[in-house]
Amino acid sequence: MVYKKKGMVDLHFTIYYHISQGLNPTQIAKKYNWKYDRIMHYIRDLKQYKLIKKVGYGTWETTEKQLGEYHKDGGNFSQLFKVRGHGFQFKLIMPKIEKWDDRIKILTKNHLQFTLVGNKGSIVRIIHKNHKIWLCNKSIIVYYPRDMSFFNKTAKRSRTDAIYHFKEIIESLERLFRISFKINKEYLFSIPKRHYALINNEFAKNYLKQGKTIEIRSRKGDLWALIDNSHNLEELELVHPVTAEKDTDRVIEPFMNLLRENPKIMQELITNISLNTRIIKAMQDEIVGITKLIKD
């Protein structure tokens, strides 16, 4: 994959999450090495929608209103709260750089902490701008923080936002090592891991209301969807490492729109699934009985 397009990074959830954990805007800015004014832009939005309130000088806390309700209010900003991209992992393909063998010396010279991990300690791991980064011999692997989310209208746009952020991280590493990681003037990379969650999802709501969870697997046994409510957002999450964007934008999203227009479909599906399960179980019992008769 080649980086080409600059996206817009939306960090309302990230800011909201850290406020809920007791951090103030200054601490959040320091944690991610962001400008204070950038944090306050999101703080103002969250305050406007009454998701947070000021309790002291430079101190905020979340209100009883859940972030999920913010999506329902119908404001312009809430239009972004449809897909939450998170759990990103990027792998940058390295060009041949002789200086790269001296990366430990460069880190030591700049008084930057690192850890040797992997097979026989062959991988240099650093924490850079709160991202865990592996500096391998032929690649750089960037792990996004668990609490970093990219909200947008589609999974594809959310991925674009995450790519733009990845570019910022790589450019800061280039400045640190004073080298370029581009190949033919482009960054070559892949995204081995990423998750997309559909917020306030009707399918998820129905199962969560019944106190149930669900994992959906392909015929090959690969997990590609699950229900999650760890952030009180009632999410249906698409997690397949290859098809996550397609599953979100071309499969699940159109189906959910159909479900919203025809709410009775959900109960009919659940009823049919339950009925079919009982029929299959009865057929299995009959087959077992017939097999026993034949053997006898």
Image (cartoon, rainbow, N blue to C red):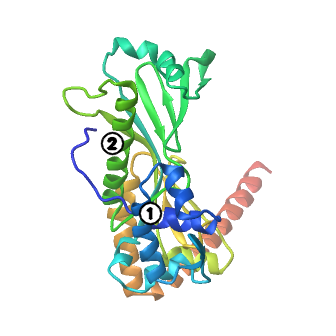
Q: Give the residue displayed 50% in from the left and 64% down from the top.
A: 15
Whole-percent x and y of residue 126? 54, 32
| Residue plotted at (31% across, 57% down) | 156
Of the residues tagged 2 and 1, which is closer to the observer? 1
- Front residue of 22/134: it is 22
In this rendering, the answer to whether 135 lies above or below 101 is below
User: Which residue is the site of mark 1?
Assistant: 39
Q: How far across and down, in percent of the image, does residue 24 sit?
A: 58, 64
Residue type at mark 2 is Lys
Q: Residues within 10 Å of mark 2 (few under 14, many from 20)?
A: some
Mark found first going from the N terminus, 2 or 1: 1
Query: In the image, what residue occupies the spot 46% across and 38% down?
Result: 142
Which image quarter is the N terminus in?
Answer: top left
Residue 225 seen: no
Callout 2: SS: helix
Q: Position of residue 43 (x, y in %)?
A: 46, 71
Q: Which mark is residue 167?
A: 2
Disc 1 crowd, CA 10 A, few/some/many (<14, 14-19, 20+): some
Residue 31 in sight in this render: yes
Question: Which residue is nearer to you in this view: 63 or 242?
Answer: 63
Label 1 SS: helix
Quarter of the image for residue 102 reads top left
> Relative to residue 46, is residue 154 drawn left or right?
left
Q: Residue furthest front?
A: 57
Gap between marks 2 and 1 measured at Cα? 20 Å
